[in-house]
Amino acid sequence: QKEVEQNSGPLSVPEGAIASLNCTYSDRGSQSFFWYRQYSGKSPELIMSIYSNGDKEDGRFTAQLNKASQYVSLLIRDSQPSDSATYLCAVTDGDSNYQLIWGAGTKLIIKP
Amino acid sequence: EPEVTQTPSHQVTQMGQEVILRCVPISNHLYFYWYRQILGQKVEFLVSFYNNEISEKSEIFDDQFSVERPDGSNFTLKIRSTKLEDSAMYFCASRGGGAGETQYFGPGTRLLVL
């Protein structure tokens, strides 16, 4: 059974601080990695995608990938109350590369 | 910016009735997906569709469910004889043709079975 593990939270972070979200995955064949943000009652919205080891930065967001450790993380700098949401980690299935394996999500709360 | 659309946004139905959920994927996308999310739970994969046929389906996607692409734009999920436990948000997603490309989600249909 292929799994993506995330701490369910909630993770509480003060406004302006760095929020760090983590994800581990079991499928060594996974090639593509995604972070989605989901507000309550809404659909998942892509935040970041990352395909190779290292860091990828986009504005306040940085995704980090370590394939050897099967670990993906998302850093949110200068956290804002509007960042409060559930963050979903998804990785491609190594057998198909067209299917995603989803984590259950980490609930992030940014406290003003 | 192109987006995935879904109709209706909300659907209330009686147990045992059939429902059809509709999706219009992004126009040049080739892969289409249906997901389900029961309130407070994780996103669950139902089915993927490519080249006018199902490419993969999960254990949830049993004979009660079917998908169809009746024309060049719509992608539908039919649930026959709905059960109480089918109450959930149903999301449609689409992606382009390359491996590892991003899946883009529609806004979802909230289905309530009474």
Image: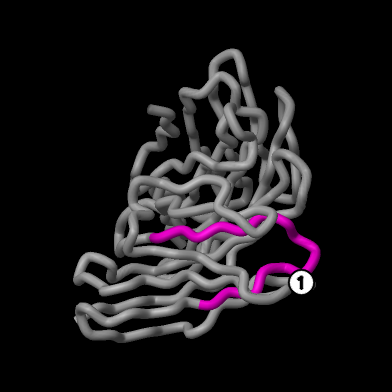
| Res B98 quadrant in image | top right
Would residue B66 appear left or right of A31 to someone viewing this image? left
Instruction: Determine the image quadrant of residue B27.
Output: bottom right
* Residue A31 shown left or right of residue A2 in the figure: right
Q: Identify the residue at horizontal 43%, vertical 67% (top origin).
A: B90
Chief secondary structure of the magenta portion: strand
The residue beneath circle 1 is B2
SS label for mark 1: loop
Residue B32 drawn in magenta = yes
Give whichever of B55, B24 is nearer the camera.
Answer: B55
User: Residue B30 location, x and y as percent?
Assistant: 73, 57
How packed mark 1 is, by other alpha carbons closer than 10 Å (few <14, some 14-19, many 20 or more), is: few
Who is closer to the viewer here, A19 or A24?
A24
Frontmost residue, A38 versus B23? B23
Q: Quadrant of residue B89?
A: bottom left
Identify which residue is drawn at 52% across, 45% down: B56
Q: Is residue A7 above or below residue A83?
A: above
Q: Determine whether B98 is above or below B49 in the image.
A: above
Q: Residue at x 49, y 34 (%)?
A: A22
Q: Quadrant of the N terminus of chain A?
A: top left
Q: Position of residue A95 (x, y in %)?
A: 58, 28
Q: Which region shows up in magenta? A: B22-36
Taking the image as shown, residue B36 lies to the left or right of residue B55, namely left
Q: How many marks?
A: 1
**In magenta stretch: residue A59:** no
Task: From this view, report whether residue B110 is shown above or below residue B40.
Answer: below
Give me the residue at 62% from left, 51% from top: A78
Q: Tell me how the rendering is colored.
A: one colour
Residue type beneath disc 1: Pro
Residue at mark 1: chain: B
Residue A76 position within the rendered picture, expressed as x and y whole percent measured from the top left: 60, 46
